[in-house]
Amino acid sequence: MTDWRGVVANRAEDLSPGVPYVRGWNRARQSAGTLAEQLVLLGLDSDFPGPVADVNVLGDGLVQLGTVRPEAAELLANLIAAGLNAESAFRRKDDGVGGSLGIDHLGAAPRGYAVAAAV
């Protein structure tokens, strides 16, 4: 099971020789730790109790968020959208174009952005 970008392959249940599982898992472990630190800073650590490192059959690292409440997933999506809006506004400012952050009162994502999650 791999999506069109080659991102989601089956988890590595049985290991094959020559596949760099440790490298992928280590990268996922570092990323899971970074994400966990940011979730603590945002006060979301109780909603995302522990990102877990894993690896797929290709040796690619995966970070599993686990089962989360829909409200927590929506909040995370809104935070990502707000960050993208802020980055976009900063770039427009650097280009001399100006503009606002474009975030509505709910922090909804701008058009063209979507968030998908797999459990």
Image (cartoon, rainbow, N blue to C red):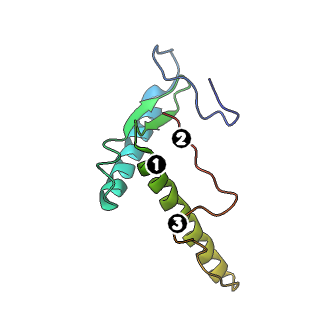
Using the image, determine if residue 118 lies above or below residue 98.
Answer: above
Q: Position of residue 38 (x, y in %)?
A: 36, 57
Q: Which mark is residue 73?
A: 1
Q: Nearer the viewer, residue 109 or 60?
A: 109
Distance of label 1 from label 2 (alpha carbons)? 8 Å
Tell me which residue sits at (55%, 61%) in the image: 81
Who comes first in sequence, dot 3 or dot 2?
3
Taking the image as shown, residue 20 lies to the left or right of residue 45, namely: right
Give the CA distance from mark 3 to mark 1. Answer: 13 Å
Sequence-wise, which precedes: disc 1 or disc 2? 1
Q: Residue at x 62, y 71 (%)?
A: 88
Q: Which residue is mark 2?
A: 117
Disc 1 marks a residue whose amino acid type is: Ala
Residue that badge 3 annotates: 107
Label 2 SS:
loop
Residue at 37% x, 41% y is: 51
**44 or 96: nearer the viewer:** 44
Q: Which quarter of the rendering shows the N terminus? A: top right
Q: Position of residue 53 (x, y in %)?
A: 39, 35
Classify residue 52 as left or right of residue 21.
left
Label 1 Cα crowd, 10 Å radius (few <14 / some 14-19 / many 20+): some
The answer to whether the residues at label 1 and label 2 have Cβ atoms under 8 Å apart is yes
- Disc 3 marks which amino acid? Gly
Q: Residue at x 56, y 25 (%)?
A: 58
